[in-house]
Amino acid sequence: MGKVVALKCVTCRKTYDPGEIDYTCPACGPLRGTLEVLYDLDRLRKTFNRESLRTNRTNSHWRYLPILPIEKPEYIQPLAVGWTPLYRSPVFEQQWHLHRVWIKDDGRNPTASYKDRASAVAIVKALEKGATVVTAASTGNAASSWAAFTALAGLETVIFVPRNAPRAKIAQLLLFGARVLQVEGNYDEAFDLCVRAAEQWGWYNRSTALNPYLGEGKKTAALEICEQLNWQVPDVVIVPVGDGCIIQGMWKGFRDFYQLGFIERLPRLIGVQAEGSAPLVRAWEQGSDIAEAVRPRTLADSIAVGIPRDQVKALRAVRESGGKFIAVKDEEILQAVQLLARKSGIMAEPAAAAALAGLKSLVEQGELHEGEQVLLQVTGNGLKDIDGVLQAVSRAPLRIEVSLKAVEQALQQP
Ligand SMILES: *Cc1c(COP(=O)(O)O)cnc(C)c1O
Ligand SMILES: [Zn+2]
């Protein structure tokens, strides 16, 4: 038997053999029937522990290989994913009277977003299956990440992106050599089209939530946080949310480490959505476990999702953790882009800065207590969406002649 002992439907709880199914539970359908990846934790515990990690020299998320769903490690691609920096921010601690504010910068991944954690795992699963053509639908980051890994592995790649995908993400896709289909529609429409095309032509699909192994890749940031903080878990972890795969993946990571005895407690997870694209916030407030579809309207393209594909796991994760979902306005996201840049030196794309906007909102609502330790998960680099982040600044460069006089005049301007 392989490492993954079963795939379990989150709704009907039926378990499947990993060899028998690739995506979602046929009985429950793609949205309700997402699958959870199960390991034999009792067996793992014997060889995988804090001590084995202490002597592990791998500086990427592959240091957690024992608890990742990889059967053939020879298919791992040589791009350094994860083990991203974790910074402390004394400025935000003082500003909001918090004991600790940590920032984990996943813009430092090879294609500059959190999605590399999932692509790194998905490419191995695609190769294990013998795939030759692969696909994904994405607001941009998942696709550009996937295209890098599939290029390395030499697979033909067909990508579906929405009409409004930022130029830098398209540039990445084209450079990595993917066939890019820019759909005359939004992300939700691109997603459905990709699923139909994959079924029609038998392509391997990396689209979020549908593929059960993505959340496994996405859990590794949580594992890193535990280890980087020397097994002291933050009280609150704030995560930007679109489909909900990152937040549920992080919860899986914390839970795995808790069950394995690496950590003694679990954090509260706060999911932050953009107000114009907040189906999970709405479901949360209504106490519903089904998110009603919305037409997304936000400048934070990576979280512009009207039908969150990982909604069952995401809502459950936040509920189990004792956290909540909150919405922030686009203006607040833009302010956060600027604040994060100026107070922490991190240039984040708008979706990624939503975590900081969420922190500010929680403080203002009195939801956090002095003495609490908070972690912001930054999910993507600002260079990915130059037009988006430029909206966060009002100043333009001053054009001057080549003279000291012109410099002097320029310095006198406000
Ligand atoms: C994908 C993405 C998110 C949201 O992740 P989900 O798994 O869709 O919730 C947030 N920020 C960035 C930068 C992303 O690329
Ligand atoms: Zn089911």
Image: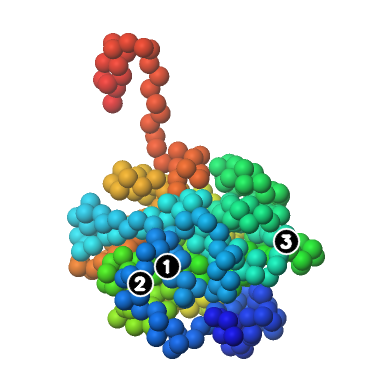
Question: What residue do we see at 50% from left, 73% from top?
Answer: 68
Question: What residue do we see at 31% from left, 65% from top?
Answer: 228
Q: Is disc 2's CB within 8 Å of ligand 1?
A: no
Question: What residue do we see at 52% from left, 56% from top?
Answer: 78
Q: Is disc 3's CB within 8 Å of ligand 1?
A: no
Question: Amino acid type of disc 1?
Answer: Arg
Residue on which disc 3 sits: 132
N-terminal label among 3 and 1: 1
User: Could you tell me if the residues under marks 3 and 2 are in contact, i.e. CB atoms within 8 Å?
Assistant: no
N-terminal label among 3 and 2: 2
Q: Is residue 316 shown left or right of residue 186?
A: left
Q: Is residue 205 shown left or right of residue 235?
A: right
Question: Amino acid type of disc 2?
Answer: Leu
Q: Which mark is residue 63?
A: 1
Residue on which disc 2 sits: 53
N-terminal label among 1 and 2: 2
User: Could you tell me if the residues under marks 1 and 2 are in contact, i.e. CB atoms within 8 Å?
Assistant: yes
